[in-house]
């Protein structure tokens, strides 16, 4: 008994970290609630975690077991998704409506998963309603290398710095939702935030007085690793630092060939790591800029976020004009060529000691091909919807994974078309039947008018091709079959296509979605079912049903009476909850139907 008390005391003193035999466990206890903030000088409610906006970091090491207790103190059902973490064989913890019933207001729910064979920079964000992220609720994830595996660059002696970039609306996420429900576009954002704060007043006529801005404190001569995430609504952002080079070293869990950039286009949902050396003379501070791309010139100044890089020996405030963005607001040529320049570092070790390039993806035979075409939003049954291959996804009240496990009929159809169909668009719950350990080629064809980003949960995919026009069979002749970077979020330019290859070795049902929140809300997503035929038919995911599963929809009757009050009870089971299925079903119906 005394030993148990001592271990518990050590757990509390270490801020939530405690190592057991084997792979260590990391514990996090988060309360998600509203917070009044003034990011653009106007008071509004944002979604905070433990009173922080952005939320606290999730910092772990490869193969650690992660336990995140989430208490939902919002007035709406909540899910969190861990963007880019592959969560091997644990779709139960994915945190999207196809895999989890949302956490009702006042409930606790505990995510338990392993950062298996991963390293790099990721983020978490709310996902029960796509537009929750427009109100915040996001935070950074760092998965560090094990000590036995070196990073493929000199250790940054200044440490890590995390930056969240994103376009921002002064309107609430509910107002944004109402606009889309009424068939109206969201309109121009009100600004761009850096770490949840508005722009530095670099120009008195453009930036009103009294806005709090981000100041990044650094020491001269040191090198820092900047982990930069675009967590915005829909805008692609160009990131740059006055007078400093950005040495790209990693993106979404893959070490890249190391190249210097003066600026980088970061599209919504994407994450990058740069090494930045503080090698300037510090006669002044320096501007850190994130400005919207491919927007009307009259709105660029409004959609520019500015933070300050402050050397400890700085002699004065930043001065002069902001560093220039690429001079091609109406032409994506610069951006597409920059994207093609990002390559996999095939000689570096990733999460394992073998080189990343030891997986020769170019030699694997493709088993399934899906050409996924998006179009501008269109009316379906009187509502404006976004589609993939003419289908606008509608989330059922029973999550797909639960419906599959319990053989609930009529929840979904396994008939998603592998190419655009010549028929009227429709709303449906249609998913892809993937082949376990098959190799899928996915071509995203963007026939809409804006840059789109696509993200796949549960996997990293190899980016092998990107070009203008319509994809054809002959386009494969341009594929990069050697060092195409492996990542989880890729941009697709308007009037262009992007091709990826993915090895379907992770059993479960996994979400493939557009990261632009307006299009995601309007149905531009689908799911891929990957069933391991060697697993028991009642256990298609490879892991048993979690003890703390929330049941809803057709399985509501399975929900046990549980206490929603916080009560720590171990690594794999904690903080259970009471039944409130009616709240879930009503909310799902109001939000998605």
Image: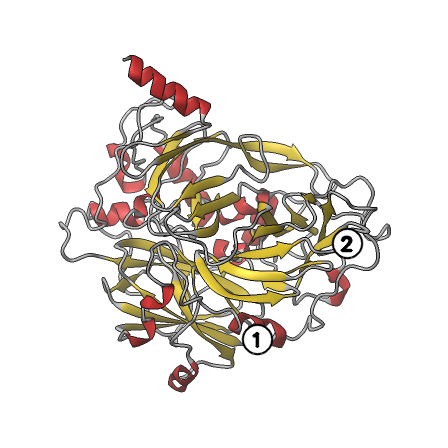
Is the residue marked by circle 1 packed among few (<14), some (14-19), or many (20+) residues within 10 Å? few
Q: Between tags 1 and 2, which lies in front?
A: 2
Determine whether 571 is above or below 531 in the image.
above
Helix, strand or loop status at disc 2? loop
Residue at (86% x, 50% y) in the render: 204
Determine whether 84 is above or below 558 in the image.
below
Circle 1 residue: 337
Q: Between residues 413 and 56, which one lies in front from this camera angle?
A: 56
Q: x%, y% of residue 301?
A: 76, 59
Q: x%, y% of residue 10?
A: 40, 22
Circle 2 residue: 281
Q: Between residues 287 and 357, which one lies in front from this camera angle?
A: 357
**Observer able to see residue 377:** no
Q: Does label 1 or label 2 sit earlier along the sequence?
A: 2
Residue at (47% x, 40% y) in the render: 58
The mark found on residue 358 in the picture is none
Q: x%, y% of residue 584?
A: 39, 37
Residue at (55% x, 58% y) in the render: 268
Is the residue marked by circle 2 packed among few (<14), some (14-19), or many (20+) residues within 10 Å? few
- Residue 265 horizontal side relative to residue 103, left or right: right
- The image quadrant of residue 345 is bottom left
Q: How many marks?
A: 2
Determine whether 50 is above or below 420 in the image.
above
């Amino acid at each position: 008994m005394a030993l148990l008390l001592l271990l518990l005391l050590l757990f509390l003193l270490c801020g939530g970290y405690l190592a057991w035999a084997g792979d260590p466990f990391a514990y996090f206890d988060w309360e998600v609630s509203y917070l009044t903030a003034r990011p653009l000088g106007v008071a509004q409610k944002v979604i905070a975690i433990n009173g922080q906006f952005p939320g606290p970091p999730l910092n772990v090491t490869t193969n650690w077991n992660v336990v995140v207790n989430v208490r939902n103190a919002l007035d709406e059902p909540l899910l969190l998704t861990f963007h880019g973490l592959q969560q091997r064989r644990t779709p139960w913890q994915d945190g999207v409506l196809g895999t989890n019933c949302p956490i009702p207001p006042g409930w606790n729910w505990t995510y338990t998963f392993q950062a298996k064979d991963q390293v790099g920079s990721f983020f978490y964000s709310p996902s029960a309603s796509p537009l929750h992220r427009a109100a915040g609720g996001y935070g950074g994830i760092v998965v560090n290398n094990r000590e036995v595996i070196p990073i493929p660059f000199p250790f940054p002696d200044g440490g890590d710095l995390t930056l969240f970039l994103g376009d921002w609306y002064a309107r609430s996420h509910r107002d944004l939702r109402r606009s889309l429900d009424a068939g109206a576009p969201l309109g121009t954002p009100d600004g761009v935030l850096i770490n949840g704060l508005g722009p530095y007043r670099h120009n008195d006529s453009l930036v009103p007085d009294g806005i709090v801005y981000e100041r990044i404190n650094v020491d001269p001569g040191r090198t820092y690793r900047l982990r930069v995430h675009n967590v915005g609504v829909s805008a692609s952002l160009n990131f740059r630092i006055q007078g400093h080079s950005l040495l790209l070293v990693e993106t979404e869990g893959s070490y890249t060939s190391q190249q210097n950039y003066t600026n980088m286009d970061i599209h919504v949902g994407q994450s990058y790591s740069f090494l930045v050396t503080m090698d300037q003379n510090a006669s002044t501070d320096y501007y850190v800029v994130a400005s919207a791309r491919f927007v009307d010139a009259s709105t660029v100044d409004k959609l520019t976020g500015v933070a300050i890089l402050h050397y400890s020996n700085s002699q004065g405030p930043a001065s002069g004009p902001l560093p220039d963005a690429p001079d091609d607001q109406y032409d994506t040529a610069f951006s597409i060529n920059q994207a093609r320049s990002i390559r996999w570092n095939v000689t570096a070790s990733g999460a394992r000691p073998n080189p990343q390039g030891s997986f020769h993806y170019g030699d694997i035979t493709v088993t399934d091909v899906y050409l996924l075409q998006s179009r501008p939003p269109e009316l379906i049954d009187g509502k404006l919807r976004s589609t993939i291959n003419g289908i606008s996804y509608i989330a059922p009240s029973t999550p797909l994974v639960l419906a599959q496990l319990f053989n609930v009929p009529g929840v979904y159809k396994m008939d998603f078309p592998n190419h655009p169909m010549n028929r009227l668009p429709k709303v449906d719950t249609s998913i892809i039947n993937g082949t376990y350990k098959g190799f899928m080629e996915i071509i995203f064809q963007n026939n809409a008018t804006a840059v789109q980003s696509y993200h796949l949960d549960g996997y990293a995919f190899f980016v092998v091709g990107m070009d203008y026009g319509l994809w054809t069979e002959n386009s494969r002749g341009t594929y990069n079959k050697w060092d195409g970077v492996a990542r989880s979020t890729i941009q697709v330019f308007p009037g262009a296509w992007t091709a990826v290859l993915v090895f379907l070795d992770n059993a479960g049902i996994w979400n493939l979605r557009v990261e632009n929140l307006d299009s995601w809300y309007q149905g531009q997503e689908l799911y891929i079912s990957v069933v391991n035929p060697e697993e028991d038919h009642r256990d298609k995911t490879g892991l048993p049903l979690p003890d703390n599963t929330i049941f809803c929809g057709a399985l509501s009757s399975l929900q046990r009476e549980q206490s929603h009050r916080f009560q720590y009870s171990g690594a794999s089971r904690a903080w259970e909850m009471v039944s409130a299925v009616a709240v879930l079903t009503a909310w799902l119906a109001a939000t998605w139907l």
